Amino acid sequence: MKKFILGLIAALSMAGAAHASGGDSIPWDKAPNKLNDMTSLQNGAKLFVNYCLNCHSAAYMRFNRLQDIGLTNEQIKENLLFTTEKVGETMKAAIDPAQAKEWFGGNPPDLTVIARSRAGQGTGADYLYTYLRTYYADETKATGWNNLAFPNVGMPHVLWELQGKRKPVFETKQEHGHDVQVFKGWEQITPGTMTPLQYDQAIGDLVNYLQWMGEPAQNTRVRVGVWVLIFLLGFTFIAWRLNASYWKDIK
């Protein structure tokens, strides 16, 4: 029950974290761009369903659309259908919207296009990748957690069992006659079920999936666009040669 309540709090604060414009205190790390990596997308979908879908919906994404990343209907039914029994249904959150509104004053935000929400300030994928990897234990906060990318965030670290507990290491430097704290690295307090490298890879997969979910047809659009450009170049060459042949005897 405790994990469920923390998940609800996380749901309500996720959108605020993704849309905050003035709270970022560190540069964003570059998210891995692996939109053509089916294994990464499948693992990201698994993480999304297990850790996000309890509270968040993806109302514009249907489960059967996961066939586009190489999953069969049977695989989807056996491993990913926790909130519905039909693969043709949209990804609805497990939480009752009425209860969420009563408990927290509002429904958890939809995550279908969350990775596109900060496109005007870099990329949403870079922000989410940094945000989900910079949580640290902070006993002064009600949730027990804080975040370097979004200081004083209200969302707890729902993936802490994977990453373990950490705290940031700062170094004091002089800037313009004032002492400032500069982030230097991390100190692991308790280990997680994953190594730091494995956790970074898992978050990369999750963010990769969120990015894909915001525009599932992106790979198809790019592929078709390349063929269209090739066709236009070929047609332009043929038209040029036909034009030269037509006018060659005319002076």
Image (tube, grey):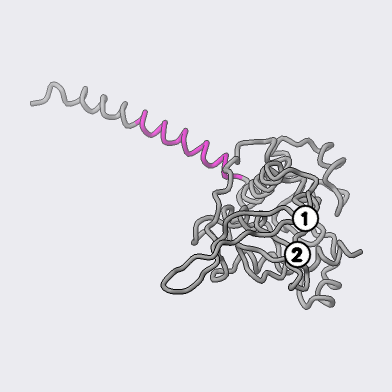
By secondary structure, the bulk of the magenta-drawn segment is best described as: helix
Identify the amino acid type marked 1: Trp
Q: Is residue 215 left or right of residue 53?
A: left
* Rendered residue at 37%/28% (across/down): 234
Residue 248 lies, in percent from the top left, at: 15, 22
The answer to which of 98 and 211 lies nearer the viewer is 211
Residue 60 falls within the magenta-colored stretch: no
72 is higher (above) or lower (below) than 15: above
- The reply to whether dot 2 and dot 1 touch (C-beta < 8 Å) is yes
The segment highlighted magenta reads 217-235
Report the Cα–Cα distance between label 2 and label 1. 9 Å
Residue 6 lies, in percent from the top left, at: 82, 65
* Rendered residue at 81%/66% (across/down): 8
Give me the disc on residue 156.
2
Instruction: Locate the N terminus and report the quarter of the image it occupies.
Output: bottom right
34 is higher (above) or lower (below) than 179: above
The answer to which of 67 and 211 lies nearer the viewer is 211
Q: Is residue 66 left or right of residue 150?
A: right
Give the class, few, some or many, for how many residues have Cα within 10 Å of label 2's Cα (few <14, many ≥20).
Answer: many
Identify the amino acid type marked 2: Pro
Residue farthest left in this picture: 251
Give me the disc on residue 160.
1
* Rendered residue at 63%/69% (across/down): 151
The answer to which of 250 and 181 lies nearer the viewer is 181
Secondary structure, mark 1, is helix
Residue 60 lies, in percent from the top left, at: 69, 56
Residue 154 lies, in percent from the top left, at: 71, 70
